Image (tube, helix red, strand yellow):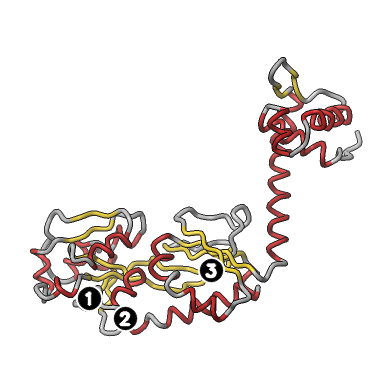
Amino acid sequence: MIDRLPPLTALRAFDAAARHLSFAKAAEELNVTPAALSFQIKSLEDHLGTALFHRLNRSVNLTEAGKTLAPGAEEGFATLRAAWRATRRLADSSALTITAGPAITAKWLAPRMFKFAAAHPEIELRFSASLKLMDFDRDEVDVAIRFGKGSDEGLFSRTVLRDWVTPMMSPKLAERIRKPADLASATLLHMDDVTDISAEANWPVWFKAAGLGPPPRGGLRFSHPDHAIDAAATGAGVVLGRICLSERDLREGRLIAPFPIALTTGSHFRFVCPKGSEEKPQIKAFLAWVLEQAKDMDVLNEGRILVSAADVTA
């Protein structure tokens, strides 16, 4: 038996028809007439020597041969499309697509990006703010800023920001909450997002680290950390704020972090991209810029007593 492949156009027509189980819908997807698509599939069946579809009055079904061929055809075209996209991106040094979580994008990246854009007008920036773990090939992403304890096996990965949490409040609220014990009568804001730091470095742990009893019950709960930080800035209560998300509010005086004790976990922000891509000009420039911006955070660490949440609960 000769393993000579049939024409690619015929396989493409079959793949579309097998996914839709409709010649009309497949023809519409490929922007050809139903007659042209039917001709391509018939030529593929002639090449194979057997039928691929049962042709009914108003629909089509796959034969056993069609069911055998369909998964490989679909996977093959998906692989080919991914390889083509990756090859095009390899040759493109003018565009940079970045994905990061909505909170870090809104609170840390976006307020700074005008500086990078001004320094690199030749690079077209595209953002995808999402908690979804993007696939670099499938989703056409160049760089991901990821948070957590992941090791990112098989990828280039570098830690760029280390996060910690400490009580933060509006200046007006800080006038009456002068010492940690005063928090016992305060409205506490809780972050119920899915990150490790929110699960491990919470109010009970901070109260224990500060030598206090259990925190007061109740308070307000938020599923997004940036929403909790915004609420604290309006005076709604005291938030156990993450430094990477509240940095701008602290610098501009909307929030105050009066107490030195801050909790850390093993979670951190990492700069992640496919191995070898870190040498592409636009990615290399963006990494250097992120690291430079991260250095600007050091001043906010001054005077902090960084305590591991794991050590407190051990």
Image coordinates for residue 308, horizontal then vertical, percent: 29, 70
Image coordinates for residue 298, horizontal then vertical, percent: 37, 83
- Distance from Cα at disc 2 to Cα at disc 3: 25 Å
Is residue 150 shown left or right of residue 220?
right
Residue at numbered disc 1: 256
Which amino acid does the dot numbered 3 rest on? Ser
Eye-nearest disc, 1 or 3: 1
Eye-nearest disc, 2 or 3: 2
Which amino acid does the dot numbered 2 rest on? Leu
Image coordinates for residue 220, horizontal then vertical, percent: 20, 55
Eye-nearest disc, 1 or 2: 1
Is residue 234 shown left or right of residue 117?
left
Q: Secondary structure at mark 2?
A: helix
Quick one: 306 or 227, which is closer to the camera? 227
Write the residue at 21% across / 67% down: 206
Residue at numbered disc 2: 300
Q: Residues within 10 Å of mark 1 (few under 14, many from 20)?
A: many
Is residue 291 shown left or right of residue 49?
left
Q: Secondary structure at mark 1?
A: loop
- Distance from Cα at disc 1 to Cα at disc 3: 33 Å
Q: Quadrant of residue 267?
A: bottom left
Q: Quadrant of residue 31?
A: top right
Quadrant occupied by the C terminus: bottom left
Image coordinates for residue 257, horizontal then vertical, percent: 22, 75
Write the residue at 88% across / 27% down: 46
- The correct choice, above or below, for 45 with respect to 11 in the image is above
Q: Earlier in the sequence, mark 1 or mark 3?
A: 3
Residue at numbered disc 3: 157
Is residue 28 shown left or right of residue 275?
right
